[in-house]
Image (cartoon, rainbow, N blue to C red):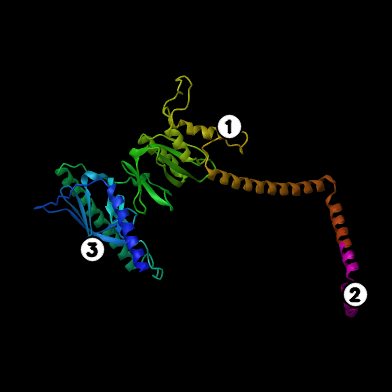
Amino acid sequence: AFRQISELRKRERQKELLQQEEATLVKQEKLIRTKNERVPRLADLTMRPVFAGRKTQGNLEAHSNGLRFISTRSEIVDIMYNNIKYAIYQPCEGDIMVLIHFHLKNPIMVGKKKHLDIQFFTEVIEASQAVDNARRSMYDPDEMDDEQRERQLRKKLNQAFKEFCKKVDIVAKKNGHELEFDIPYRDLGFTGNPHKEMVNIVPTLNCLVNLTETPFFVVDLEHVDHVHFERVTYMSKAFDMVLVNKDFSKQPWRIDMIPNGDKDAIQEWLTDMEITYTEGPMNLNWKQITATVKDDDRFYMNTEEDEVTEKEAGWEFLRMFGREDEEDEDPDEDDSEFGDDRVESEASDEEEEVDEFVSDDDDDEEDFDADEDLEEEGLDWDEMEAAAAADDRRKRNRDEDLDPEPARKQNQSSKRRR
């Protein structure tokens, strides 16, 4: 009885949560299915996110006012054309999949959760291989046949997805909807850590995305107010990028551990996109910064309220942190009120390394001083060898006085030889 009551309470709680989720949704129009015409269709697709933790496979169809996905278990997801903000087609070029991704204006329900990003993909090759598979030579005929089939399959799938995107574009425009598929600029891509693992991040015409791994990373450049590069120093091999949201009540997007070699290309791309950027040597407390900026009515102006006193306009004040640190004679002193706690731990680690380095230098200096003392005595090589031989004799005599037994055995053995 207790278990039944617990299960009943759990179901009621889930029902309440589902109703709360659905109450915040923007009501979508009903899908108008295309009749008396051939419907553009992509078969054998996998959808992300999934229904109830299960892999969701099915077909995607393009109708008059939207797209409909029908899974093999008869689950249906409708995506209206007027709810699609960005449509992205990513062909398989060095990846394991070819995909179509939709970034929506308003979230829709998939299963029991709201989602703003819906993706459909097909794997070209398996993401993993069995460990016990025997390795074959690169000139093995079977290996070469597999590679040839993989190239043909990749080309076939890329062509099928590309033609489907063109057909969807035609159907949408025919019914008065604007829909255009963007393709990521792979030559501007870079590696970074937006969540918990290193992934390949690429820009599109309107976004900065990683669509291959989950959770998806999609930054709408329309919502980016400023970009700041953290941990930019001569000694570091990587830096972090913070994309500040125009809505200061929301936390910025972060991409950590970007290789230094990509910084110039990223800054050139930001300049082309007309997005301002700054850089500095330390991590900042963005929660405090955004709260301060949100309360400043004259943030983007270059004067104070008296309209006479000059100040840094907008995000230019972030440049001051780097200049102050370089001009400050005391490296341990930090006047920034926006410093991050992570900086303190990094600084303590650096101090420990410096202390170890200094102690090693002190040991080397002591050895060097001892060598100088020998030189200052003015002894030539013969005198030094004689002194060393006398010292060896004294050590042997002292050892014989402490333990005469070995010396007695040595004398007896010498007498027997005689």
Q: Nearer the viewer, residue 246 or 39?
A: 246
Question: At 47% from the left edge and 27% from the top edge, which residue is drawn?
Answer: 312
Question: At 40% from the left edge and 34% from the top edge, which residue is drawn?
Answer: 276
Label located before the other in sequence (2 or 1) = 1
Residue range (magenta):
395-418
Q: Crowding near pointer 1: few (<14 within 10 Å), some, many (20+)?
A: few
Question: At 64% from the left edge and 45% from the top edge, which residue is drawn?
Answer: 354
Q: Nearer the viewer, residue 248 or 314?
A: 248
Amino acid type of disc 1? Answer: Glu
Position in image of residue 7 (x %, y %): 34, 64
Quarter in which the C terminus is drawn: bottom right
Magenta stretch containing residue 403, yes or no? yes
Q: Is residue 208 left or right of residue 75?
A: right
Vertical position of residue 415 compared to residue 55: above or below: below
Amino acid type of disc 2? Answer: Arg
**Label 3 belongs to which residue?**
73
**Label 2 belongs to which residue?**
408
Label located before the other in sequence (2 or 3) = 3
**Label 1 belongs to which residue?**
327
Label 3, secondary structure: give it: loop
